[in-house]
């Protein structure tokens, strides 16, 4: 490959990285290169470094990432628990109805050291989440910049518009952070927790009416009653998005490569 070709290829690759960002850490919950499943109580990431742990929830295990529409994991092979697409299941220990909002779910700690605010403009957190019929359909994503001593609380978010939202994957849920403190920080982390419904609702199975911020809205609010249920995570990803001037520099390199290529062909 000649020098000009290398310039063009480098520019194209650089532009691709800039447009898509750079993955810092990702959990796909599948087997590693040695065919070992992660530790369900503290699953290791598939890309980068970090720790994942459950908040109050117990009985952690791995189940299918393909079922009920499937997660966004590109590995769609089966069987569950072997070499295929696995999700991280949080099945027990959820709070009872009307108590413990924002206390149960999953926590992920990810060092962003080496990713400075001078080079990166945004930090994007994405994740797939499957709801069981009897689980809460509302989550909240909080983050910390001091190792969990203090949490910056997110906005309660409802998954699914229809009443029948249970046994369903909701993929690529996201939060974009532009707070400079999240960069180059070994104490960065976030948690995804079950929270009370921010809207008043009626539980169809019992006819009970709940005011806003007082109870968990069940995922399948037609025939199911809240019982904690299960959440299942997949493709939990932290991505750094370059600062705009980095885009400009890469675009300039691509333009230079194109100009040289045209000149050579003239």
Image (spheres, rainbow, N blue to C red):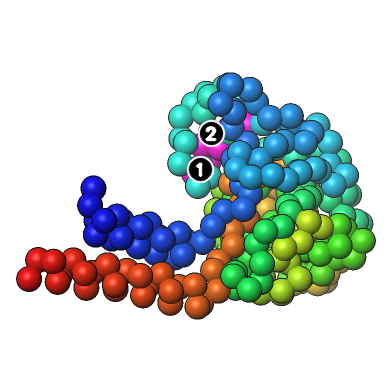
Question: Few, some or many C-alpha atoms within 10 Å of disc 1 (few <14, some 14-19, many ≥20)?
Answer: many
Q: Residue at x 36, y 75 (%)?
A: 252
> Is residue 1 highlighted in magenta?
no
Quadrant containing the C terminus is bottom left
Q: Could you say which is closer to the camera, residue 40 or residue 217?
A: 40
Instruction: Examine the residues drawn in magenta and state their main secondary structure.
Output: loop
Residue position marked by numbered label 1 in the rendering: 73
Q: Which residues are magenta?
A: 63-69
| Mark linked to residue 85 | 2
- Residue 32 pos. (x, y %): 59, 28
Q: Secondary structure at mark 1?
A: loop
- Residue 193 pos. (x, y %): 78, 56
| Mark linked to residue 210 | none
Q: Earlier in the sequence, mark 1 or mark 2?
A: 1
Q: Secondary structure at mark 2?
A: loop
Residue 215 appears left or right of 221? right
- Residue 219 pos. (x, y %): 67, 53
Question: Few, some or many C-alpha atoms within 10 Å of disc 2 (few <14, some 14-19, many ≥20)?
Answer: many
- Residue 48 pos. (x, y %): 64, 45
Residue 36 in the image: above or below residue 121: above
Q: Residue at x 82, y 69 (%)?
A: 152
Q: In the rendered image, is residue 126 in sight?
A: no
Q: In the rendered image, is residue 40 in sight?
A: yes
Residue 114 appears left or right of 11? right
């Amino acid at each position: 490959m000649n020098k000009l070709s290398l310039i063009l290829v480098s520019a194209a690759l650089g532009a691709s990285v800039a447009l898509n960002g750079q993955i810092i850490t990702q959990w796909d919950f599948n087997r590693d290169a040695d065919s070992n499943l992660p530790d369900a109580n503290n699953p290791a990431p598939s890309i980068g470094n970090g720790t994942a742990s459950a908040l109050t929830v117990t009985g952690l295990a791995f189940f299918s990432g393909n079922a009920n529409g499937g997660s966004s994991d590109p590995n769609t092979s089966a069987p569950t628990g072997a070499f295929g697409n696995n999700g991280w299941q949080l099945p027990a220990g959820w709070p009872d109805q009307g108590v413990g909002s924002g206390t149960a779910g999953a926590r992920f700690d990810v060092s962003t050291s080496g990713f400075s605010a001078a080079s990166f403009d945004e930090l994007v957190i994405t994740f797939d989440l499957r709801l069981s019929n009897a689980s809460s359909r509302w989550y909240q994503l909080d983050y910390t910049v001091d190792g969990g001593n203090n949490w910056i609380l997110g906005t309660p978010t409802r998954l699914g518009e229809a009443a029948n939202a249970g046994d369903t994957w909701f993929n690529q849920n996201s939060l974009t952070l532009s707070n400079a403190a999240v960069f180059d920080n070994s104490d960065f982390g976030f948690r995804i927790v079950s929270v009370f419904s921010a809207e008043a609702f009626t539980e169809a199975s019992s006819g009970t009416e709940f005011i806003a911020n007082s109870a968990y809205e069940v995922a399948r609010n037609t025939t199911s009653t809240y019982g904690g249920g299960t959440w299942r995570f997949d493709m939990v990803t932290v991505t750094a998005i370059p600062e705009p001037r980095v885009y400009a520099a890469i675009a300039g390199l691509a333009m230079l490569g194109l100009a040289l290529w045209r000149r050579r062909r003239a």
